[in-house]
């Protein structure tokens, strides 16, 4: 398991235990494996949005849409990921980059003043 996957899993476990009002799911945005070329290629489906955050959810009490882009300490946010985060925030949702569980806790507590 990659360090980023391990962090995603830890964040999901934290959300499950500490934020039961959130319904969330992980988004796997990997390319499609081409068995002929024996390599991954990007998905050309025009209805798939590039840059969608790793964890997407909604607060069932408030209706707030939440998007969490998970990165390790050295991971970089792509332009498509930044665009998605900015678009969600501009639309009234809560989207951010999390490099630790503490980042998630801080952002959610700021939003809900827990």
Image (spheres, rainbow, N blue to C red):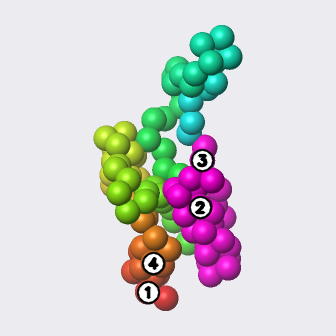
Mark nearest the camera among 4 and 3 is 4
Mark nearest the camera among 2 and 3 is 2
- Rounded to the nearest angstrom, the CA distance separating label 4 from label 1 is 15 Å
Q: Residue at x 44, y 41 (%)?
A: 51
Mark nearest the camera among 2 and 4 is 2
Q: Inspect the magenta stretch and tell me whether residue 49 lies in it.
A: no
* SS type, badge 2: helix
Mark 2 Cα-neighbour bin, 10 Å: few <14, some 14–19, many ≥20: few
Name the residue carrying label 1.
113
Task: Specify which label sits upstream in the sequence, 3 or 1.
Answer: 3
The image quarter containing residue 57 is bottom right
Is residue 47 positioned above or below 108 on the image?
Answer: above
The image's mark for residue 6 is 2
Extent of the magenta region: 1-28
Q: Say whether marks 2 and 4 touch (CB < 8 Å).
A: no
Task: Specify which label sits upstream in the sequence, 2 or 4.
Answer: 2
Q: Residue at x 31, y 41 (%)?
A: 79
Q: Residue 32 or 90: which is nearer the viewer? A: 32
In the rendered structure, the answer to whether residue 59 lies left or right of residue 96 reads right
Name the residue carrying label 4.
102
Q: Position of residue 100 (x, y in %)?
A: 46, 70
- Rounded to the nearest angstrom, the CA distance separating label 2 from label 4 is 15 Å
- Rounded to the nearest angstrom, the CA distance separating label 3 from label 1 is 27 Å
Q: Residue at x 45, y 82 (%)?
A: 109
Mark nearest the camera among 4 and 1 is 4
């Amino acid at each position: 398991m990659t360090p980023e996957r391990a962090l995603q899993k830890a964040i999901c476990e934290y959300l499950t235990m500490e934020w039961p009002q959130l319904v969330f799911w992980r988004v796997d945005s990997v390319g499609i494996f081409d068995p002929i070329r024996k390599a991954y290629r990007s998905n050309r489906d025009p209805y798939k949005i590039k840059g969608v955050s790793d964890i997407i959810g909604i607060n069932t009490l408030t209706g707030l849409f939440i998007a969490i882009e998970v990165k390790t300490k050295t991971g970089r946010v792509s332009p498509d990921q930044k665009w998605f985060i900015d678009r969600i925030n501009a639309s009234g949702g809560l989207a951010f980059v999390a490099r630790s569980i503490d980042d998630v806790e801080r952002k959610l507590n700021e939003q809900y003043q827990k």
